[in-house]
């Protein structure tokens, strides 16, 4: 069995001042075989997962990527005690291959991605992510981007707004919300988060027998559009798997069904699941790709189904409730990893 992991304490007891990472123990357990090498935390945020990994082994080196300069500055300060074992990089994680090239690396032992919005972003009103705090309608994770949520809300046509809200927010009332936004902005531009939230709430009506705010899906849709979150996700997964050393592990956490759907299907594709017309649903166990759809066995899944947070974790951190974790190990695997697959819950494609 995997050795029992040590319990860890965050430096200076400041974990509540930073983003509280989700599924930390599960992440460390899944990446435990990688703790002698280099792990890339592609969305390091304020460093919660990275610190857990650094505490779990004195040999691991973590490269932390984030396109949010404010979060990266906090991670750099938080992880300063670990010296050169933590390397911060200000970049979009989808440019993983460029980052590794600059670090002089062709492959790494582990890759972690947490696609959630951090508490830092949600709780900083000036960032414009939260409908619970009044701030400018911004929502840019990377301040170098030029288009804000206010730009989209005030310039898109009613049809384009409805399409955006339905596609990225999976909001059934998308047309009603888009119409309300267009009518409101005809009187004056919509500039703040609370102003937009009130418009959406009036359009949707009372909360639909849940504790979820009526504006949740609309804000999600705008955030995804502003940051172009879904574009290139498949390509990133392809590159991440390609850059894993044999036996290396990929762990990815998503928070909404749009991302999880892409992740689930792409990981399945890399297990050799062939989706072409001739061999649909067949499994290619050889390394050579299918000449029609390109499927090849590059990955062995470590999670039969997505791992969800425990009830206890959700009670302590309600923002964890929608998290889904999926993981895989790079094929071909070293003999000792292959023989030990069941210890980490690895499953056949």
Image: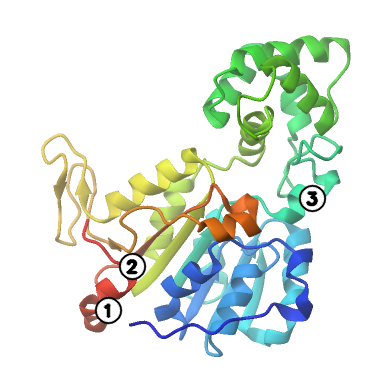
Where does the N terminus fall, quadrant-wise? bottom left
The quarter of the picture where residue 221 lies is: top right
Q: Earlier in the sequence, mark 1 or mark 3?
A: 3
Q: Is residue 43 above or below residue 8?
A: above
- Percent position (x, y) of residue 125? 84, 45
Would residue 242 appear left or right of 347 to someone viewing this image?
Answer: right
Residue 42, visible in the rendered structure: yes
Quick one: 81 or 141, which is closer to the camera?
81
Q: Residue furthest bottom?
A: 58
Where does the C terminus fall, quadrant-wise? bottom left
Q: Residues within 10 Å of mark 3 (few under 14, many from 20)?
A: some
Q: Which circle marks residue 337 in the picture?
A: 1
The quarter of the picture where residue 29 lies is: bottom left
> Is there CB contact under 8 Å for labels 2 and 1?
yes
Find the distance from the CA under tag 2 to the CA under tag 1. Answer: 9 Å
Q: Which circle marks residue 105 in the picture?
A: none
Residue 143, visible in the rendered structure: no
Q: Which residue is mark 3?
A: 123
Q: Which circle marks residue 329 in the picture?
A: 2
Find the distance from the CA under tag 1 to the CA under tag 3. Answer: 42 Å
């Amino acid at each position: 069995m995997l050795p029992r992991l040590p319990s860890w304490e965050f430096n200076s007891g400041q974990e509540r001042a930073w983003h509280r990472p989700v599924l930390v123990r599960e992440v460390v357990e899944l990446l435990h075989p990688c703790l002698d090498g280099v792990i890339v935390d592609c969305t390091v945020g304020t460093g919660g997962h990275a610190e857990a990994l650094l505490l779990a082994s004195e040999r691991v080196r973590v490269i932390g990527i984030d396109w949010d300069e404010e979060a990266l500055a906090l991670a750099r300060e938080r992880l300063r005690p670990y010296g050169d074992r933590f390397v911060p990089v200000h970049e979009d994680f989808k440019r993983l291959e460029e980052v590794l090239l600059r670090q002089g690396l062709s492959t790494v032992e582990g890759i972690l991605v947490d696609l959630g919005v951090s508490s830092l972003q949600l709780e900083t009103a000036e960032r414009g992510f939260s409908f619970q705090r009044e701030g400018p309608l911004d929502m840019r994770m990377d301040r170098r981007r030029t288009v804000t949520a206010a730009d989209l809300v005030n310039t898109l046509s009613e049809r384009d707004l409805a399409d955006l809200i339905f596609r990225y927010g999976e909001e059934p009332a998308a047309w009603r919300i888009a119409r309300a936004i267009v009518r409101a902005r005809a009187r004056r531009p919509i500039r703040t988060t609370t102003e937009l939230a009130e418009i959406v709430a009036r359009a949707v009506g009372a909360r639909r027998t849940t504790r979820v705010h009526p504006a949740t899906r609309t804000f999600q849709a705008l955030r995804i559009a502003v940051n172009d979150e879904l574009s290139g996700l498949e390509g990133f997964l392809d590159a991440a798997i390609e850059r894993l050393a044999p036996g290396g592990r990929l762990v990815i956490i998503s928070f909404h069904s749009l991302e999880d759907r892409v992740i689930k299907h792409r990981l399945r594709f890399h297990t050799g699941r062939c989706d072409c017309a001739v061999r649909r649903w067949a499994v290619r166990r050889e390394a050579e790709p299918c000449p029609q759809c390109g499927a090849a066995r590059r990955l062995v899944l470590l999670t039969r189904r997505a791992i969800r947070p425990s009830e206890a974790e959700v009670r302590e951190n309600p923002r964890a409730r929608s998290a889904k974790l999926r993981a895989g190990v790079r094929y071909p695997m070293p003999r000792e990893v292959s023989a030990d697959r069941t210890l980490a819950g690895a499953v056949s494609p």
